[in-house]
Amino acid sequence: MNPTNQALNISVFAVFVLITLYIVYRASSRNVTQSDYYAAGSSFTGGQNGMALAGDFLSAASFLGISGAIAVTGYDGFLYSIGWVVAWLMGLMLIAERLRNTGRYTLGDVLAFRMRQRPVRAAAANATLVISLFYMIAQMAGAGGLIALLLDVHDRTAQAAVIAIVGLIMLFYVLVGGMKGTTWVQIIKAVLLILCVTMITVFLLGKFGFNLSAILRGAAERSPLGEAVLSPGAKYGATDTTKLDFISLALALVLGTASLPHVLMRFYTVPNAREARRSVSWAIWLMATFYLCTLVIGFGAMALVGPEAIANAPGGENSAAPLLAFRVGGTVLLGIVAAVAFATILAVVAGLTITASASFAHDVYANVIKRGKADTRSEVRVARITAVVIGVLSIIGGIAANGQNVAFLVALAFAIAASANLSTILYSLFWKRFNTRGTLWAMYGGLISSLVLIAFSPAVSGTPDSIIPTVDFHWFPLSNPGLVSIPLSFLFGFLGTILSRQPADERKQAEMEVRSLTGIGSGLR
Amino acid sequence: MTKSLSARPRPGFATFEPEPRRDYLDADGEIDFVALQASPDFQRLRRRAVRFALPATVLFLVWYLTYVLLSAYAPGFMSQPVFGAVNVGLLFGMLQFVSTVVITLLYGRYAKRRVDPEVDAVRALVDQR
């Protein structure tokens, strides 16, 4: 890559940062209460929030990771796209509206509603912090690889400096803009990203005479695997264990999406349940478009760039989309794609930071430490301080994890989210008898079992692709724990509930059920 | 809706109708959620809220898992060509997108027509509109 193109990349990205910084600054005029800082005063419309949901959800793993996975392994990479679209139906039909009606700012609001406040809020905050940090470090680590590829910076120190800059801009969004500013960043980013992939897709289709078969044939001809890339099994078909891993991943993808804390938090930025429903519908349309495009982009990259050229480029699989952009649109399109990819990382990390800081300030500080007696100003101050701490942690983690396998970290975050949060959310919304002990067992059971299984999985040790390839202490055969830890958390929640003598609080259950369906008592509408 | 409206005249108006019904308020005038939960209006809302969502959730999960399991254990079937270079697996994959969008549309329509009016009816019982 030549220097002019590098300057172009940086300037396109700089324009994005300047525009968003200005908007964040304009949006920040009133950011004093928890409602403003955590939930943007619940002032966004369903359409706006749907775009922001897409912005929050479509991470670098979605854009670069999936198109890369399809470009190298074909069919097996397509599973990510499908899982992440289908998963939204769960959020739409079971979770979004009820969560909006029941809670105010965090997941802890809903889970602790009819349980003992302090232990349940502490558990919810723990899960939120672990999931968010996992997800965030994956994003920041991805930034390192992107920098190498797009800005042609190969020096580790310089990469570290760029990761730090990304982290600092993100912190500015969060501290100054609060949820409102961050939401606008997500909206702008989602529009740019979806426009960008649609443009490339239409261009690609045009190049192949608007014939999907032609792209697929071109890809199969170019790939060393031949026709096999169009069929399942190129990556996961080898043995019975890899097949189980495929199923485990599939489960984590479909059940993890509606359990991610930063996705759940997005249901609070709208005024009522109907707008929450509308925003998920919007998000589904946007996601379906986006992920269909990844299919074309992935196979297009396979056909035009070739899997070997992609695997050998700096950044490996992640470089498929940028290389394809260069191939079809030259330096200008590469510059745009690079900038959009950076914007994506920036926005996702901002969304995660605000979620994690809200969870700590609202659940741990205000409700566990201060027992619900914290005043507005100090709670928001704690949230801001937490955001700084988390931002710094993610910068350090991102620098340390620079160069690690990114896609797997993200899939792990999904597995942890599905294990710790999903069973608890569904039980507390739909199971009358569910009680405090059940909640704690389900959350900690899912969280701890998924973390332990990951620690002793081939993802961490024992294979050439592991984080620690030189040592081998793995005994769990699957790289993704979802297949075991998700059912386990449902089982823990069930056992904890029936083994506890303490009955569920019937009055609170009635209040929660009525409120979750109608919004009565929540002051909404 | 009409029934509840006529049953609850607005306070402060001099009318000859009886005192406003207090079924769903407790002694302190707070909302009695246990009574409200047991009310026929709320029970109807609850049934309607799950009547579409639950079967649809089971359906999309089964359909997704079928796709995943066929991909893992029946690669031969999934690689049969359908048209051009598109095989059964890719076609099923794309149909997952179609089914997702269709369920989204149907749910939106169902919720608007069958659930939202019930929500309004229950809210009207306690004068929250």
Image (cartoon, rainbow, N blue to C red):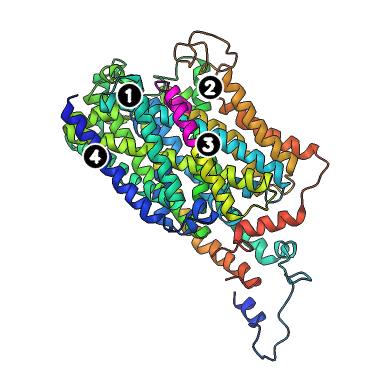
Name the amino acid type tagged 2: Leu
Q: Secondary structure at mark 2?
A: helix
Q: Secondary structure at mark 3?
A: helix
Instruction: Looking at the image, tell me whether mark 1 or mark 3 is earlier in sequence order.
Output: 1
Categorize mark 2 by other alpha carbons within 10 Å: few (<14), some (14-19), many (20+).
many
Name the amino acid type tagged 4: Val
Query: Do marks 1 and 3 both belong to one polypeptide chain?
Result: yes
Mark 1 highlights which residue? A158
Instruction: Looking at the image, tell me whether mark 2 or mark 3 is earlier in sequence order.
Output: 2
Question: Which callout, 1 or 4, points to the residue nearer the camera?
Answer: 1
Cα separation between marks 2 and 3: 18 Å
**Of the pair B83 and A219, the residue shown nearer to us:** A219
Task: Find residue A10 and report its horizontal and vertical position in percent.
Answer: 25, 35
Query: Do marks 2 and 1 both belong to one polypeptide chain?
Result: yes
Task: Find residue A383 and report its horizontal and vertical position in percent.
Answer: 54, 45
Mark 2 highlights which residue? A244
Mark 3 highlights which residue? A256
Looking at the image, do the residues carrying marks 2 and 3 touch, with CB atoms under 8 Å apart?
Answer: no
Q: Secondary structure at mark 4?
A: helix
Q: Chain of mark 4?
A: A
Mark 4 highlights which residue? A12
Task: Find residue A358 and report its horizontal and vertical position in percent.
Answer: 55, 45
| Residue pictured at 23% horizontal, 38% vertical | A11
User: As drawn, is A356 to the left or to the right of A301?
Assistant: right
Q: Quadrant of the N terminus of chain A?
A: top left
Quarter residue A126 falls in: top right
Instruction: Looking at the image, tell me whether mark 2 or mark 4 is earlier in sequence order.
Output: 4
Magenta segment boundaries in residue numbering: A389-409
Question: Which callout, 2 or 3, points to the residue nearer the camera?
Answer: 3
Residue A406 lies within the magenta run: yes
